[in-house]
Image: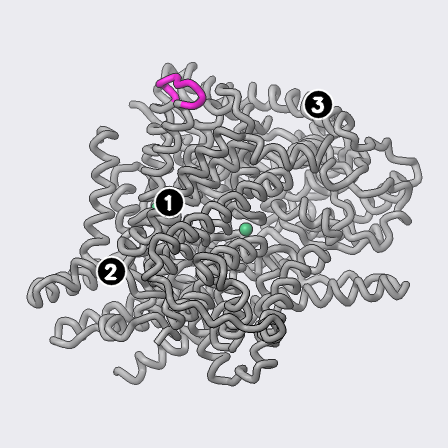
Amino acid sequence: MRPILTRVYALAEMMAASCLVIIAALVLLQVMGRIADGTLKFLGFEAVGFLVPSLAEIAGFLLVGASFLALASTLRHAVHIRVSLAISHAPAGLRKVMETLVLVLGLALIGYFSWYAVLLSLDSYQFNELSFGIIPIPLWIPQAVMALGLIVFAVSILDDLIVQLSGGTPSYVLAEQGKGIEGAD
Amino acid sequence: MDLSLFAPLLGVVLLVSLALGLWVSVALAACALFAMYFVSAPSGPVLMTTVWGAANSWDLTALPMFIWMGEILFRSKLSENMFAGLSPWMRNLPGRLFHVNIIGCGIFAAVSGSSAATTATIGKMALPELLKRGYDERLAIGTLAGSGTLGLLIPPSIILIVYGAATEQSIARLFIAGVLPGAMLCLLFMGYVIAWSLINRAKMPEADPAIPFMERLIATRGLLPIILLIVGVIGSIYAGLAAPTEAAAVGVLLSLFLSWWYGTLTKASFTDALLGATRTSCMIAFILAGAAMLTVAMGFTGIPRELAGWIGSMNLSPYALLAALTLFFIVLGCFLDGISVVVLTTSVILPMVEAAGLDLIWFGIYLVLVVEMSQITPPVGFNLFVLQAMTGRNIFQIARMALPFFLIMILAVALIVAFPGLATWLPQTMLSN
Amino acid sequence: AETKWDMPTPYGDNNFHTMNIAEFAEDVGEATGGSLTIQIHSAGSLFKHPEIKNAVRKGLAPIGEVLISRLSNEDPIFGLDSVPFLATSYDDAKKLYDASRPLLEKKLEEQGLQLLFAVPWPPQGIYAKKEVKSLDDLKGVKFRAYNAATEQIAQLAGAVPTQVEVPDIPTAFSTGRVDAMITSPSTGANTKAWDFLSHYHDTQAWLPKNMVIVNKAAFDALSEDEKNVVLKAAAEAETRGWEASKAETADKTKVLADNGITVVDPSNELMGGFAEIGATMVEEWKASAGDEGAAVIDAYRN
Ligand code: NA
Ligand code: NA
């Protein structure tokens, strides 16, 4: 099970990172189009009017992918921040109870939101909701990506909860322990 | 439920969730869900619709791009060379390289519209260098937290766009109005750093030995790449090649080019930078999602509106009104994202402001200053979150380090109240008709 | 029982649409003796503009306001009031609205929505940094496009469609990323267009409308008296809104002129060119909207 889960988290994160790369590529394509148009005009030719259609909307949707698909991996690298002041100073027994409570609450909430994210996407599918711009994009697609990201996040919390309950240390606690200011040695 | 009971109860729910060790984003969501329980609208669909609306945002795409840019530059030799180039010139200015934080944020703010992006990008480059050179960690983090907020005041600015749209004020004028107060705040911050370093001489690292002018000039070559980067990014906006949001991607491309130029661009450094950026922006985006949930829940409960209305019912004089509003924004800004506070209360506050005869452009700048404060007040302050992720210090420690800068911002508010021309003179002069 | 409706709207409190809605809300509260109150959440403070229609459809908010043509990708009928040069005066726009209302209501009803009233924006004119005397002057000009229709207008006019988001408009004009746009005198005056451009051409290309919609289930849950009050207040708001819109057109065009913008009465040559573009786009609209759409156009023209 562990290798499968690890690959799921890594795959989701890779997709999230790809979304960022695509955003940058699309924007740069548009900028280069403007440079090309400007050059043509300067040389006395007619501008082509190079346009990445619905750039703003598509970039917004890709950002949803980037933000949500990375949730699980961000947790496992302890980048989701929290105030561990109380929990880190609590006696071992209490700390264990608190950490379990955090995981149970986290799982309940993220599970709840995953469910409603799925419903949101289904509803958009049923009502054929479309984006407003030049290219009509069915909203259920980016919304399904959001739901998927939340579900993977919920799975990763459940994963850590099981680790915690079986006496191990959750991934993010391990990652927290090795943190300092990167590059400042 | 009675408001005087309900509002503090929500604050307690949030604080308890945070103290338990729940992730900030999840704690905000928990608090939002709790608040929605007392409202007739269906919680799940309302919160999810809101998250969708908040997450799929064009303006927000600049944030991961800028963070990515910072991660790339951090893995190149650029920041090291930049500090090496600046160091000989700054040795006679008390506070020396601390000023790089402030000026760096000030310059970067001219490109970025958000304070989180400003803090994350400059912090990623400057903080490790400062600590390596023995600068005081508390002041290094404090100056970053404080001057990161300049991202909002110096144009472009997300909050001024939101305010301009809600109040039908010219965004161009608001942007110009932010320039002088932004410069003033920069100078105030630098003044504080100078004073601190004169008082705490023992905490300052040894100054670099004096080096001859020619050698200084040679070391200054190290500044060329960063100048190229800044000129490239700002230039792409003013040459009409890129929208402010798009300029961030130009910054990524230029940073990759510089990293390649230095020979630090490898497959590993590229992947590390990209994943680092993905995680940091995921963390911030998810907190923004949580904050959006809390905002819509507050919209339904009507708490901020009622509190603002309560201030209005007191019929205060203009100065007393501003004092009351400042206090109100500071308190609310501790728990809500500052922009949300503005959005939730504009309808109630604006009529009071107009009745008091205050200029709406001026009031926009005043609002930005108070919203800036909310970025560095715990428990909900985005600059604190960015710096916690970067340093591992918790948000309350960071807020303590940022406290002097919070107080300076209060001073800045007092100054623009006393001298309104600071905000109104430039737009009136530059755009005369 | 006391009912409180939360009402998300997209524009700020000083906008004439919001002011009209505020009066509508007040009327409802008064006439029902407070048994139904409407709390307006303006400027997208509860739900943002793209989410408002769905929020009302799902009953997250019982009532809301939305720009009709925002939904034009969903069904052509929502794009009818933005077909250029089809209805170019308040009288024509009213006629077009009356002709399209049954179909509009039917399409909304399929989503569990009920149309309460619709109010037009002032007619759309062309803003540019120079005078546009004929379509030739638009050749190669960077023209703001924000949806399929505006993109097509730009293309048919030989201009270069350029995407610019609303908050970015001043910067885009100042830095030369865009040279011209088509919008109402309201938007021009509110964004202080004189800060970044010089000419306004009163082409009256179309009159886009905002509509106030209510969730059918929420409406049906009201008492008969309350329903009648809402419908009556809505009818009044519609009449009042159309008048307010006319006044807004006069006011804001004057504001533009007072601030140094040259208000151009478009030349016959320019209007002739646009008439052709309009005719093309009307035919295309009819083709996309099918028989029921063609029937609306026929009803409008007779
Ligand atoms: Na800025
Ligand atoms: Na705060």
Q: Residue at x 45, y 66 (%)?
A: B126
Q: Of helix, strand and loop, which one carries label 2? A: helix
Identify the magenta region. Answer: B312-319
In the image, which is nearer the foreground, mark 1 or mark 2?
1
Amino acid type at circle 1 is: Phe
Q: Of helix, strand and loop, which one carries label 1? A: helix
C180 over B142 or under it: above or below: above
Report in which chain the residue with disc 2 lies: A
The numbered dot on residue B406 is 1
Q: Of helix, strand and loop, which one carries label 3? A: helix
Residue A89: which quarter of the image? Answer: bottom left
B349 over B233 or under it: above or below: above
Q: Residue at x 49, y 45 (%)?
A: B185
CA gap between label 2 and label 3 equals: 55 Å
Nearer to me, C98 or B98:
B98
Q: Whole-percent x and y of residue B376?
A: 36, 49
B410 over C165 or under it: above or below: above
Residue C63 in sight here:
no
Query: Mark 3 — residue?
Result: C251
Q: Is residue C173 left or right of residue A171?
A: right
Amino acid type at circle 3 is: Asp
CA gap between label 3 and label 1 equals: 44 Å
Query: Mark 2 — residue?
Result: A106
How many numbered marks appear? 3
Query: Both on one chain, marks 2 and 3?
Result: no
Residue B132 in sight here:
yes
Amino acid type at circle 2 is: Gly
Q: Residue at x 66, y 44 (%)?
A: C79
